[in-house]
Amino acid sequence: MGPIGIWIAALLTLGIYSFLYKDNPVYKTCEAIFVGVSAGYWGVVYYFDNIYKKFWLEAVVPEDKNLMLYGGAILGVLFLTRLFGKISWISRWPLAFIVGATAGLYMMTYFVSNAMNQVASTIMDAIARGGDGSIDWTQTFGTFVILVGVVTGLIYFFFSKEHKGAFGSAARVGIWFLMVTFGASFGYTVMSRMSLLIGRMDFLLGDWLRIIN
Amino acid sequence: MLSTIATVLMTLIGLSLFYVLYLTIKGRPVERRMVFLYIGLGVMLPLMMKIAPPLPITSDVQKLCDYIEKLEPDSKVLCAFDFDPPSAPELQPMAVAFVKYAFKHNLKMIIMGLWPQGPQQAQLAITTALKDSTVASHSHVEGVDWVNLGFQSGNEFVIQSMGSTFKSMFPRDTRLIPYDSIPLMKNVVNFSNVDFVMNFGAGKPGTIEWVQLGVDRFKAKLGAGNTAVQATEVYPYLRSGQLVGLLGGMSGAAEFEKVLNEKGKASTFLLAQMFGHAMVMAFVIIGNVAYFVLARKQKNSATNA
């Protein structure tokens, strides 16, 4: 990025951060620029990679045209009928195609990857052993925690029986597991957001002000 | 000099938190802008400090590195760059470390993206890696040592189609050279012709889709680098063996750099993240104190009334 680009990026970054003080016209301008540039960028990339590189160069220009691509192109064009009131209903056809294909694909992939394989990984030897045959206590404890977490978590989401007595106690343990999961997830989210701030600070102090290397 | 000043300032800021806690106990909590200022300084000053925080290597990262190190020279690695600039602070250091390692160990990279900006991030990683003196000492040719196939829309359907042929989804690379004319893609039909898949993912489509289709359907070996937000969703696939290894967020990136001996941005960012987290934890405690102080005040005023 050249010096002009760095200055523009730095001023836009500061403009966005000005929202931390309070909402203001500079922030609104920077936000509008971001939305506009993003939309423009996506438009160019989609045009170049899909319409030009994939369709034009494969289905229009060459001698041995890839005729399969015309099917997709026609469905894509049908989406645009949404803009014309009287025939806007035609846009439901490509939408139906996408919904049907996606549902069909997900049905199998989620069942295999998220159900079967995950259940299989929960069923394991209660006592884990290391390479030399000795008991791996850490792994064994982890297996026990997973087993308790899975069972009590399932009990919590079982609503056909009232959560009372031993069943209710197990459901409460399930809630604790869920809370710990949410906490860990939130902790990771904070970590991620902090990384974004670090990235911007590094840009401002390094690329722009050149205080750090 | 700058490092010393930053260290002294950081110490003073840390001590001033006790004063903020004192004000809170007295019933005068600081306003939210002060919290922003503290977090900003807590992240900015450590970037100027020259302290290397301790960094133990987790088994998730070690497993991935062990697998990568076992790859023979000339192995073909499919690199899926499924992220954009907002996720770059976490994922770009991982990508740069991986690309440098691949160049130094003669791994052949087939780059693609399910996110529009992904291949551009890959190009940035390659440009950075080629500036490394060790990498630059060997000649690396586009189309022979690496190829950037670009972006393809269609999310998980792209992976599904790649299971038949890569060419159906990527008939040309980003230079518009036809698939069959790229030397690296000779004899590469589908997943059965690549030795490893490395995904840098920031969301959907990303690692989960690669596991569901690339691994479970087409039996590819997959390693992943994820943003911290996504890592919790991906961990179950690691335990079940569907993933070879996982790099989670900035700490995962720093560990990856350390194990591969490719020091980069993540290692320098780690101290800033450590202090940033400490600042957040301090304000969580102060916020809870403020909550209880306020609750007690309201209770007292209700009793007096």
Image (cartoon, coloured by chain):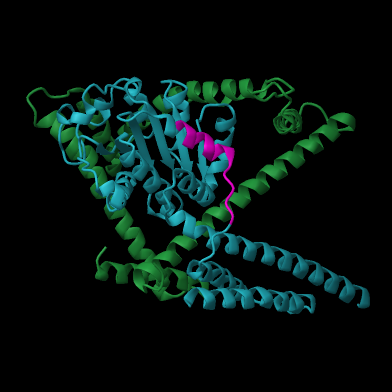
- The residue at 20%/27% (across/down) is A70
Query: Percent position (x, y) of residue A85?
Result: 30, 42
Q: What range is drawn magenta here?
A: B54-67
Which of the two residues, A166 or A148, is positioned nearer the viewer here?
A148
Which of the two residues, A1 or A91, is positioned nearer the viewer here?
A1
How many numbered dots are placed on residues in this image? Answer: 0
- The residue at 72%/68% (across/down) is B286
Vertical comparison of A205 with B200: above or below: below
Vertical comparison of B147 with A161: above or below: below
Q: Is residue B55 magenta?
A: yes
Residue B206 lies in what quarter of the image? top left
Left or right of A35 on screen, residue B255? right
Query: Percent position (x, y) of residue B82?
Result: 39, 42
Q: Colour of chain B?
A: cyan
Q: Colour of chain A?
A: green
- The residue at 46%/34% (across/down) is B223
Q: Is residue A139 magenta?
A: no
Q: Quadrant of the C terminus of chain B?
A: bottom right
Which of the two residues, B180 or A50, is positioned nearer the viewer here?
B180
